[in-house]
Image (spheres, rainbow, N blue to C red):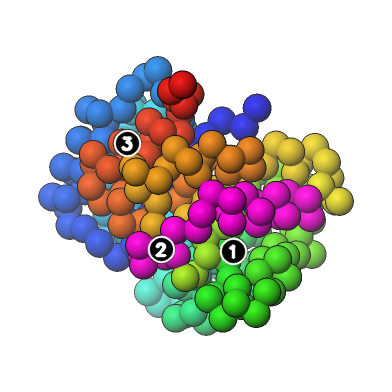
Amino acid sequence: MRKPLVAANWKMHGSREMTRELIMAIRDGVDDSWDTEILICPPYVYLDEASRQLDGSGIALGAQHLNPNPGGAHTGEVSAPMLADLGCTHVIVGHSERRAMYGDDDAVVAANFQAAQAAGLIPVLCVGETLEEREAGTTGVVVAEQVEAVTAAAGIEAFDKAVLAYEPVWAIGTGLTATPEQAQEVHAGLRGLLAKMSDKIASDLRILYGGSVKGANARALFGMPDIDGGLIGGASLEASEFLAICEAAGTPARA
Ligand code: 13P
């Protein structure tokens, strides 16, 4: 069984104080009976503070980005070994904001994915289509190409220690959520694509949904057979909303 994973992507939000307070509130609110793995990805500069706050909580720490080089003359950049040194276990790669605004194309995303794994980090690989691509009926092709760019470089075996996240670009930060059926269709397509390379890896792989997930819509999304949790932006900045999402992922639906 795939244990549900709920990951918080704080994006470029927060302060030291917010990091402390939000993590404290999340730690206080988590119920041990929930079958949910939780991951928090704050901005780089708050990773160390977050790492201290999360110590002993069982909640994992991740980064939002990395530079694929292990070290060297790369002013302003942060490497995977540095993230591991700070206590990160995960790192997001291929987020649509990075693809759209910072030139992270499929080759960069594949390099970041491999560099993360080389340092022992679990990459959370994001894929997703734009509104134009959805309206043109090319969603399946677009997300397949994004995933295949990574399987071609890293091999299917690499997905044994990775997480996939489907984040339709039109649903990110817009309040427009994919319906559970729309998301399920894409998740099932992605799992099917990977199953052609390895049944076992595809069936064990967690595929998260991201894009305007909230407490109110989480349970319906997570009730779909191929949606194994969520990657949460805006709602992860509010402890009560984030906790409601974690609860929805890790408790059976009430009759
Ligand atoms: P929102 O939850 O704010 O739509 O953001 C989703 C996202 O991009 C998470 O990586």
Q: Is mark 3 within 8 Å of ligand 1?
A: no
The residue type indicated by label 1 comes to Val
Q: Which mark is residue 222?
A: none
Q: Which residue is mark 3?
A: 244
Q: Which mark is residue 127?
A: 1
How many residues crowd around disc 2 within 10 Å: few (fewer than 14), some, or many (20 or more)? few
Identify the secondary structure beneath mark 1. Answer: strand
The residue type indicated by label 3 comes to Ala
Q: Left or right of 194: which side holds 67?
A: left
Q: Residue at x 31, y 27 (%)?
A: 30
Q: Nearer the viewer, mark 2 or mark 3?
A: 2
The residue type indicated by label 2 comes to Leu
How many residues crowd around disc 3 within 10 Å: few (fewer than 14), some, or many (20 or more)? some
Identify the secondary structure beneath mark 2. Answer: loop
Q: Residue at x 23, y 47 (%)?
A: 238
Seen in the picture, residue 116 relative to 215 is either above or below; the reply is below
